[in-house]
Amino acid sequence: MELEKPFGVITACHRGDYFLVKATCASIRHFCGDVPVCVVVDGDFDVSELVRTYNVRILRTRELPDRRMRELCSGSARSKMAAMWVGPFERYLYLDADAIFWGDVVSKVEWDEEDFLVFWPELTGPAERSWLTRFYFNVDQLLAFDPAFSWEWNTYFCTGAFAARRGAITWDTWMRVENWWRNQPTMFSWTEDQGILNYLVFSKQQHGTLHVGRRDLQWIPEHGGIKETRLRFPSSLSTLPATVPNVSILHFCGQKPHVHRLGAYSRNFTAARIHHYRRSLNKSGWFAIAAILREECLLIQERARRKISKLIGRFEEGVNANAPTASNRI
C-alpha cells in the first residue's frame, strides 16, 4: 500500500457490517468528492464492489506487518487502530461503518497542530463513576495502575468518529494498557477500543505528549433523539442533498440503521444505501431499493439462524446434563 499521503478518510468493516460500509463510502464520495479513502477490512470476504465504485484503498488486518498486531486487530473493534499504526495517511479522519458523512465534514475539521481531534459536544460537567464504568473504564481499577490520572473533567467521546495523526498513540503504548487489562479483566467496558483510546488520549494530554482538540462533529441519533435528528438533519430517501444546514458525522450506534428494525431510526443512512446502489448498479432507485431489501432479508435469515443454533445448543446441553452416567445406570 502506498504510504505518506498527507490526509485521507478511514473506515473499517467486517463481514457482518460490509453492507453498512457501502453507505459510508457513498456518503464520503458524495459530500467530499475525491478525498482519499482507505477501508480497513477484517476478514477474507470480497470487497471489489467498494474498490470498483469508489476507488478506495484496502488494508486487511490479516496483512498487517506484525503477528501480534494481526492478532489484536482481527475479530475486534481494535481493527480501526491499524490506521493509527500502519495506515496510509499522515493525518486521517476515522468513522465506523455504521456512520455516514452528512455534508462536507472534511472542510470542517481544519486542524494544524493538534495530534488528535475528539468529535463530541463541549463538556458541561464532571464525569460520573457509574457512567464511566458502563461506557469506558472502572475508575478505581484504572487508578491502581495510573494513580496520577485526572479522570473527572475529560471530554470522553464515542470512538466511532475522530481524527488523528498517524502514530500519535504508539503500538507499545497501547500494548502497555492492554497488559493492564489482561491483569484486571473488568477494568475496561464491553468495547475493546473505546475505554483504552479515551484513557490514552486524555492521559497523554495531561502529560503534555498529545495535543488534543475538539470539534462538535459527531451526532448519534439514539443519544440526541429521533425528533431532534429529523429537525437537524432532514433527509429525503430519493437522493442525498447537495448541501446540508448542519454538517456532521451521523453515527448510528446502538440501534443499527436496519430498515426492518422498527425501533431504529435509519432514514439518513438508508438514503446513503440507496445512493450507493444507484451509483454501483447505474440503475434507477427501484433497483437500489430491491438490493437493500435483499440485504435486509439476508440479515433476518442470519439472525434467525443464530438464534436457532443457540436454542439447539441449549437443548443439547440440557439433554447431556440429564443423561444417565455410568455410575447411576441400572
Image: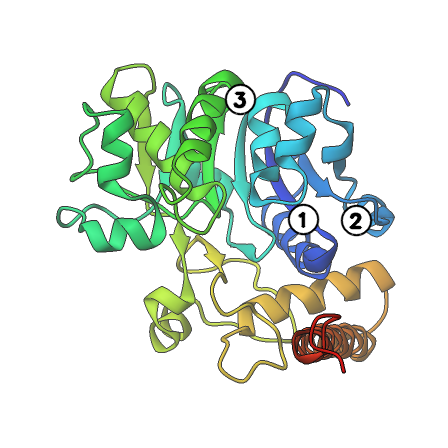
Q: Amino acid at mark 3?
A: Arg
Residue 245 lies, with reference to residue 271, above or below; the image says above
Distance Cα–Cα, label 1 vs label 3: 19 Å
- Regarding mark 2 in the picture, which secondary structure is present there? helix
CB-based contact (under 8 Å), mark 1 and mark 2: no
**Viewer-side residue, 222 vs 287:** 222
Q: Are marks 1 and 3 in contact (CB under 8 Å)?
A: no
Residue drawn at x 36%, y 28% is 200
What residue did someone put label 3 on? 166
- Packing grade of label 1 (10 A; few <14, some 14-19, many >=20) is many
Q: Is residue 320 above or below residue 119?
A: below
Q: Nearer the viewer, mark 1 or mark 3?
A: 1
Mark 3 vs mark 2, CA separation in Å = 24 Å
* Local SS, label 3: loop
Of mark 1 and mark 2, the one earlier in the sequence is 1
Report crowding for label 3: few under 14, some 14 to 19, many 20 or more residues within 10 A (C-alpha).
Answer: many
Which disc, if any, is residue 13? 1
Q: Specify whether 3 is left or right of 186.
A: right
- Residue carrying label 2: 50
Q: Residues within 10 Å of mark 2 (few under 14, many from 20)?
A: many
Which three-letter amino acid code belongs to the residue tagged 1?
Cys
Q: Where residue 53 sits in the image (x, y, percent)?
A: 81, 50
> Residue at left 70%, top 18%?
3
Judge whether 227 appears above or below 110 on screen: below
Residue placed most toward the observer, 155 or 308: 308
- Distance (Cα) linking label 1 and label 2: 12 Å
